Image (spheres, rainbow, N blue to C red):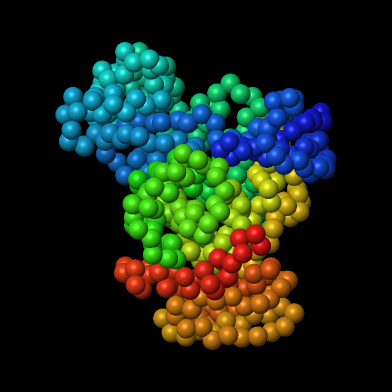
Amino acid sequence: MIAPETFSTIDVAHEARIRRWSATVNPARSDIGQRIAVGPADESEPPPGLHVAGGVPLRVALLTINDARVEHAGRGALLASAAEIIVELRSDDGRSFGERASALRDARPDLAFVLAGDHNADSVVELCEALRYACSDVHPQPRVIVSGDAKSAQRLDRVLSSFSREIVPDARHEDGRAAAVDRLRAFRRGTNVALVLRDEALESLALAVARDAGVAAAVVDVSGSSTSLVHADPGGAIVAAHLVPLGSGRGADRVVARAGLDRVRRWIPRPVDAPGLLERVFNRARWPDAIAVDPLALTLEIALAHEAIAHALADAGATGTLPERFRSAPVVVLTGRLAELPRAAQSLLVAANALRPAVIATVFRDRDDALVSLGGIAAALKMRYGHDLEAIAGRTETHRALLGVVVPVNASRPATVRVTGGATFAEQVAPGGFFALAASGAVQVIVSGGLRGRGIAGPLGVLIDARGTPLVLPPRDAERVPAVARWFAALDALADAAA
């Protein structure tokens, strides 16, 4: 029998800010959320029972054979474990031995992830020799994880004998992928036994929401220097993508470096010159916890979130996980900075524009990191006891702030949307339409052409989105700015920021 345990505090860290929850947890019977105290950490207070944070950054060199399935598996494991790929060497990349060694030496990775596949050790031996030549005399040396069939892994283990190394099963199989993710997360956690990684908390949260709702759930999180997408179903299956270091705070400049300034600028509903916007981006990275006090600063944060989510979806797609997996959840929960935008309409707008739900979806957002703290508790109980999520069963509903329902209408001709709930009404929707219908409570939605589903309409009602997928923005500012401004206006998303 599991003894009760008390977490005196659960701290959820975000850049320099900490939100602190207090809860008593009994793995058999939970009394979570008795009281909440929100504010900066105080050194005079006792150490937290749990600390939800990003952990130690992990910069990884990926060494892989020329096999798309093997590469996808390796990238998928790294994306699932929130590790950053800083250099990739393929067995067929054409570079000389010296160029490969130079790339590894300049990158100074914390860890090398070597993927051998099936009986393909010969093709990656030279990559491992380049790693040994480049990094044997650096301090600290990178750690090495080798993944592949037993024969290949053992041969590479001999080549890499000068490094601290581990062998995990083939990452193309579920057991190998899980083992690699566990080891990578252990490196990020270090020796801090009170630390729950943010990605672990988000995955436990998604599963808890799915079980509470009885349907698949997606959690979309944009923090200062990470972006996460998690899909979970009530049966326990989880698919996750944790992209580091892209975010809307400290990682703002990395978003621009990867996406380009023009792709960020396109989401801002007003003309803005590139040099001025670039200065704001780098100020955002230098002062990540600054509160947006003017419309341009606020729309920049929203634009950064758009691009961060877009790249998380793209990276998931590059590992073989279709973006539609995340878009197919009937329940969507927004956390992190997405949940902290001044107006609920701004959060819903990002979900509609960036996630692009493919089904009728009810959208919620977190309240003061309460859901992330619950996910942290569930993750801690699982790590310590292998216990199920019963400790937080039914608690997620209390701390989810309901926004509204998103109805995707993908049609090349006008369609009819019928909403039933309280009152029944129908709307004709032309391609490109984007507007909200006033409704509240449980609704059933039927779109001509076959799409139907149920949702819960909140203060923002039912959002009808007939702009199509993928969402295409006009290339010229003269057309793009009015279009984006209309989308903001449709939800009254740029009104008084204090509302």
Above or below residue 415? Residue 360 is above
Along the line of sight, the residue nearer the viewer: 419 or 338: 338
Identify the residue shown where x is 77% and y is 42%: 36
How many numbered marks appear?
A: 0
Along the line of sight, the residue nearer the viewer: 386 or 11: 11
Identify the residue shown where x is 41% and y is 25%: 110
Regarding residue 382, the answer to whether it shows in the image is no
The quadrant of the picture occupied by the C terminus is: bottom right
Identify the residue shown where x is 45% and y is 73%: 467
Regarding residue 165, the answer to whether it shows in the image is yes
The quadrant of the picture occupied by the N terminus is: top right
Identify the residue shown where x is 50% and y is 40%: 287
Along the line of sight, the residue nearer the viewer: 3 or 460: 460
Q: Position of residue 103 (x, y in %)?
A: 26, 29
Q: Position of residue 293 (x, y in %)?
A: 56, 54
Above or below residue 319? Residue 166 is above
Judged left or right of residue 222, residue 264 is left
Along the line of sight, the residue nearer the viewer: 292 or 242: 292
Q: Position of residue 431 (x, y in %)?
A: 44, 80
Above or below residue 494? Residue 310 is above
- Which image quarter: residue 423? bottom right
Q: Position of residue 197 (x, y in %)?
A: 58, 35
